[in-house]
Image (spheres, helix red, strand yellow):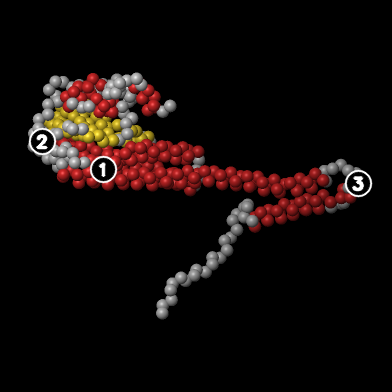
Amino acid sequence: MTTAAKKRSETIGQPPGALVYVGDKSDKEIEITISTYTSEEYTEKVAQSFRPGDLSRPDTQVTWINVNGLHRVKDLKYLGQCFQLHPLVLEDIVHTDQRPKLEEFGSYLFFIVKMLQLDGMEVNSEQVSIILGDHFVISLHEHEEDIFEPVRQRLQGGTGRIRAAGADYLAYALLDLIVDHYFAILESLGEGIEDIEAELLTRPTSDTLTQIHRLKRDTIMMRRAVWPLREVVSRLERSDSPFIQDHTLLYLKDAYDHVTMVIDSIETYRDILAGMLDIYLSGVSNRLNEVMMLLTIMATIFIPLTFIAGVYGMNFRYMPELEWRWGYFTVLFGMAVLAGGMLLYFWRKGWIGWKRPNPEPLPRLDLKTPRS
């Protein structure tokens, strides 16, 4: 049973909308960052739980609520009550094995994406839930690390157009940051594939096969995260929701192009890895064939020699060659000639030893059309 299936078993028998966190258990405190901004000012407040008055939503400002950590469901219930979130939305947030998707409600848009990050040589997947409404954005993800720090720095510094734009552009900025992480992982996968290709051309080992399987696993994980995301971004781009302004649609189209590029790269890497696996198996089979051929050649050479030695090893009294003065040397010479002739034959066939010199190349044909 997979880890996701084991975690899902905890929800058996629960009514729809029950908040049962199925992600990694943690005893750390969650971190809640509430940012409000306009084109002229920016304020930020960090807390470990929601307090009355924290979730006021003035229409003249954009409010961004970022929650790091989903294991404390009572805060999520309070968040859902303040923003009138559907119970099934809250359920999808705490069920962290969801497929990327987009759902439209009357007062907000809800979509789920997968954040992929490199941890050494491993690719970790994390569910990110984003809720876009009128003048507010809510982002929730599993772990305590702040994965949206670059966006927050842009808000604090007032760089770019993010402060002057609305909440829809902020949601796009979060989505764009997640897509940018995909390119970083693709770069790491490409470097790993190049290293394995160099090993395949020299002397592959069992570690090479392990690396190929690891890269295939990472590629499959990326494919599961990115393929549904293309549909999510496409629906956002074509949506007529009042929460997405016309000037943001162009940026969503750019995000769609980036997702398509990632998918194309993933499919290319999948084909390359499948070919590399075939090359590795072919190389192992060829080395085994070379060993078997060498053993067969040695056995073929020594079988007649063993026969001759067996014949003259018989202790019959009346064997004519036993009385010859040069009989011993004659038999040895004959055995040497026989072995040498067989080696020469095997060499001419190209089965052993150094390669035969290549014949002179055929003259190249001039395929140019003669001028009239």
Residue 165 figure quarter: top left
Residue 211 seen from this side: no
The amino acid on which the numbered mark 3 sits, given as a three-letter code, is Tyr
Left-right relation of 84 to 180: left
Specify few, some or many for label 1: CA neighbours under 10 Å numbering under 14, 14-19, or 20 or more. Answer: some
Circle 1 — which element?
Answer: helix
Q: Position of residue 82 (x, y in %)?
A: 16, 24
Residue position for label 3: 318
Instruction: In the displayed orientation, state which residue is furthest to the bottom.
Output: 372
Quarter of the rendering occupied by the C terminus: bottom left
Q: Nearer the viewer, mark 1 or mark 3?
A: 1
Kindly report the distance in space between the C-alpha atoms of the residues bearing marks 2 and 1: 29 Å
The tag earlier along the polypeptide, 1 or 3, is 1
Residue sitting nearer the eye, 164 or 362: 164
Q: Position of residue 260 (x, y in %)?
A: 30, 46
Residue position for label 1: 234
The amino acid on which the numbered mark 1 sits, given as a three-letter code, is Ser
Circle 2 — which element?
Answer: loop
Q: Nearer the viewer, mark 2 or mark 1?
A: 1
The tag earlier along the polypeptide, 2 or 3, is 2
For image coordinates 61% across by 44% down, the residue present is 291
Specify few, some or many for label 2: CA neighbours under 10 Å numbering under 14, 14-19, or 20 or more. Answer: some
Q: Nearer the viewer, mark 2 or mark 3?
A: 2
Residue 113 figure quarter: top left
Residue 186 seen from this side: yes
Quarter of the rendering occupied by the N terminus: top left
